[in-house]
Amino acid sequence: MDRVISGVGFVFLAASLGSAQPSGGPYGPIDQTYEIPKAAHVYYVAPDGKSDATGAALAEPTTLEAAIARVVTGDAIVLRGGEYRTGGLVLNQGITMQPYRAERPILKGTQVAAQWQTLRGGVWRTPWKRLFPAAPLGWWQRANEGTRTPLHRFNNDMVFLDGELLKSAGWEGELDAHSFFIDYQGGYVYLGVNPANRLVEITAFDSALVRTGMTVHGKSNDHKGPVIRGITFTQYAYRALEVEGKKRFTAADEPTDEPVGPSDPSTYGKEVTGTVLENVSITFCSRVAGYFRGDGLIIRNSLVSDTSTEGIYVIGSSDVLLEKNIIRRNNVEQLTGYYPSAVKIFNQSYRVTVRDNLVLDNPNSSGVWYDVGNRDGVFVNNYVENAVNGFSLRFRAGPRLPATSSCAATAASIS
């Protein structure tokens, strides 16, 4: 039976399971062969590229880092397939990034740990310099949640053993075959299983790419967002992607504090506009797949999976479209008291459309959350299954959300 809930200029239609009309896909990344972009300059990059190479020819690729520093508005970076263990890339130009033909470039935020010392009691350790200690934001209620979520779970480091994400432990004596411990003071990572002949990957970067509004590489912000297609980002501490606004945030900052207080939408969301992600995969980020700020954002046919507090986080942005994505397995660390959601749309965002997505496997997380201050959002033809709340809405006034979406084995929360 359909329900209509109204109040303070707000109308919400919650559709029954039978009336939802998801398209049937295809959802998530679509395998395809990419043509070389018709760009002013095309830079070819490869995992084994040379930083001093121009990258102008397929046979003489440069590095991704060098290309990011050189590109200007309208240029393109074409990535050969393979693993790029890199991060901390910063860009402020409107460019295209895509694979070469049907190849599969994978950006990884981890490095391989190969030097291990055997200790007593079935414990091994390795020195590690790139650590990412963190703490919950100030509004987290330790008095209520401290017995359910240990503080070390909020650190942003991740360790993978043969591809398996290990769980953090509080000290060496708590280790088992599926956990790790970090001594931040000494700078060591500990395992409870013999790493010999195993692939151990430890986070070394807390971002893959940040699209900043600041001056970088000797260039001023052109206000144009990147177009990113067909690339996988995985195993990043904190987040893989971020599109900044006027401010620069760290893991210790409240990420939604732009704008602050009721604001005219003409005064924010303009630093970077028109960002596009298509056929992108973002997986295994210790906090968020991506923070996205700026009008005209499109995320389409992408996969966002195995994140912690949020998957896709849209902040202070207008005219946004999320379409035909697969968004799954948020809050893999099972943090409590942190209001996790696979998709969050926060802080005075206007006309954000969430249409025809699959939001799956979030038993410790909400599915899609529109928070206070959103206006004229649309949540339509989505399928949400196995979430704490399939659709959460917090409002004071204004938005109209005609929701014709399925929420199976879950619930809706409206307040």
Image (tube, rainbow, N blue to C red):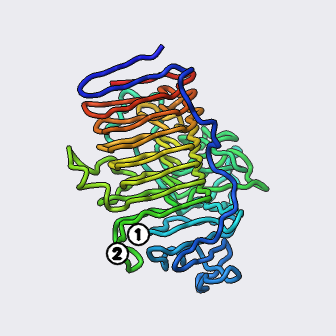
Q: At 73% across and 55% down in the image, what residue appears? A: 199
Q: At 44% across and 57% down in the image, what residue appears? A: 242
Looking at the rendered structure, which numbered label has been put on residue 275? none
Q: Which residue is mark 2?
A: 220
The spot of residue 297 in percent (x, y) is: 43, 53
Q: Quadrant of residue 392?
A: top left
Which amino acid type corresponds to the residue marked 1 in the rendered image?
Asn
The spot of residue 136 in percent (x, y) is: 39, 42
The secondary structure type at the circle numbered 1 is loop
Local packing at callout 1 (Cα closer than 10 Å; few below 14, some 14-19, many 20+) is: many
The spot of residue 84 in percent (x, y) is: 63, 66
Decide which of 14, 344 is in the foreground and name it.
14
Measure how far apart labels 1 and 2 are at the Cα level: 7 Å
Q: Which residue is mark 1?
A: 92
Residue at far top of view: 1
The secondary structure type at the circle numbered 2 is loop
Q: Quadrant of the C terminus?
A: top left
Disc 1 to disc 2: CB gap under 8 Å: yes
Decide which of 38, 46 is in the foreground and name it.
38
Q: Is residue 73 above or below residue 169?
A: below
